[in-house]
Structures are given as structure tokens and as C-alpha cells.
Image: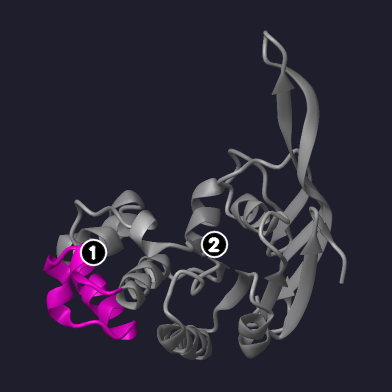
Amino acid sequence: MTAGEKILEIEDLRVHFPVRGGIFRRAVGACKAVDGVTLCLKRGQTLGLVGESGCGKSTLAKSVVKLIEPTSGTIRFGNKEVIAGEAETNFRKSVQMVFQDPAESLNSRMTVGTIIGEPLDIHQVGDPKERRNRVLQLLEQVGLPENAIKRYPFEFSGGQRQRIGIARALALNPELIVLDEPVSALDVSVQSQVLNLLMDLQAELGLTYLLIAHDLAVVKHVSDMIAVMYLGKVVE
């Protein structure tokens, strides 16, 4: 796949959650979190998806990385439809996610080295020495010191913890990274540093980003294209 080619296509995607009521908690309706969204993202670009809280942005993001199974619609990655159970291992290597709050997404009982190296362990990439070297390389790429490998998340600032999350997402050399509100939990003074890091990594590694945010200024700063969501639909 070369630059400019379609890497992600979302067509008429719907994610509906049942609304239950009554004594027997039967489904009495549906919450249409994502309701007929169609988007296209080209390799090497950043698509910014903006909207107010509760509009369905994060649900869409989790659907793309298969954390939530869509109700209907199709997701194509590299011109191949992503179907549950079919070639999911390769898909999960190619598509990774950075979560909103690093304090919640990083296991406080695990060292930074274990957190970053976990995807390598799960997918059995290399031997232990190669995995450790890869973790050290990732720490350097995100601007963290080598001794961070033995420390714990609580020993770092919010911005540094998000860098750990970014390093974890990079571990398997993904083609696409879904960024779910990656700076909204950070101080304003730190937000620009993390955004600049993401842009530098994109230029260096040829990454493609789907950026989820509620702050239009953040989205404009880093995005090639912008889509606006409202009540589960893309309206602009």
C-alpha cells in the first residue's frame, strides 16, 4: 500500500445499544450511538473527527479497533473487509489505539517496560532480548529515558504517561493509530508537546491517524481532513 491509497473505509456504520425497561429488563428501544457513518481515510493522512461529548465519536473509534462490534455496516482496512474472527491477528497488529486517560489505560501494577512490551509478548514477536531492545527503542522514540523501563506509571506526569501509551501503540509497527482524545486529559501546556510528538512520529514512520477530539482547535492543528459528528451522524 502506497501513500495516498485508501487505508480505512467506513461505510454506513451503525452501533446501536439496547435500551431496557420493565420488570424483566426487556429491550424497549435502542440508543443509536453511531447511526450510518461513512468515512474514508488515506494512508499517511490524519482524519480529525470532532463533536461534543456523547455524539458517538469514541464508540466509532472503538468499533474501528474491534473493541465494540458494530450493529451493521462495513469497515475495510487496506481494501479488505474486517470481519470478526477472520485474520484478526494481522488486523490488530496493523491498527492500534491510544486512549484518552493514560491514568486509566495503563496498568499501575506493571512496569513501563512490561506495559510497552506486552503487545510483543502477546504476538510472540522476537526473543526476550529483542523485545527488550524494541522497548528501549520505543522509549527513545517518544522522548523517555532508558531507566523508565523499570519504573511504574504513577512515577510519571500525565504527559509522560501518554507518551508511554503512544509507545505501547507503536510496538507492533502499526499502519493506523486511532487517537481517542489523546490530549484532553492533559494540561494545556503539555498538549502541544504531545501533539508535536504525534506529528513527528507520523512524518518519521509514515503513520495514518484517526483523531477523535471535542476541541476543534486541536483537530485543526494536526488534521488533513475534518469530519463533524452530531447525535451519531457525520453532519459536516
Reading the image, the residue beneath label 2 is: 95
Which residue is painted at 21% across and 63% down in the image?
A: 154
Question: How many angstroms separate mark 2 from mark 1 (CA)?
Answer: 24 Å
Badge 2 element: strand
Residue ID at (43%, 62%): 101
User: Mark on residue 153?
Assistant: 1
Give percent across and percent down for residue 82. 67, 50
Lower sequence index among marks 2 and 1: 2
Q: Residue drawn at (12%, 77%), measured in percent from left and top? A: 147
* Residues drawn in magenta: 130-157
Q: Residue at x 19, y 83 (%)?
A: 145
- Residue 47 is situated, as x and y percent measured from the top left of the image, at 69, 76
Going by the numbered disc 1, the residue's amino acid type is Pro
Q: Residues within 10 Å of mark 1 (few under 14, many from 20)?
A: many
CB atoms at circles 2 and 1 under 8 Å apart? no
Indicate the secondary structure of the residue bearing disc 1.
helix
Is there any visible trace of residue 110 in the rendered image? yes
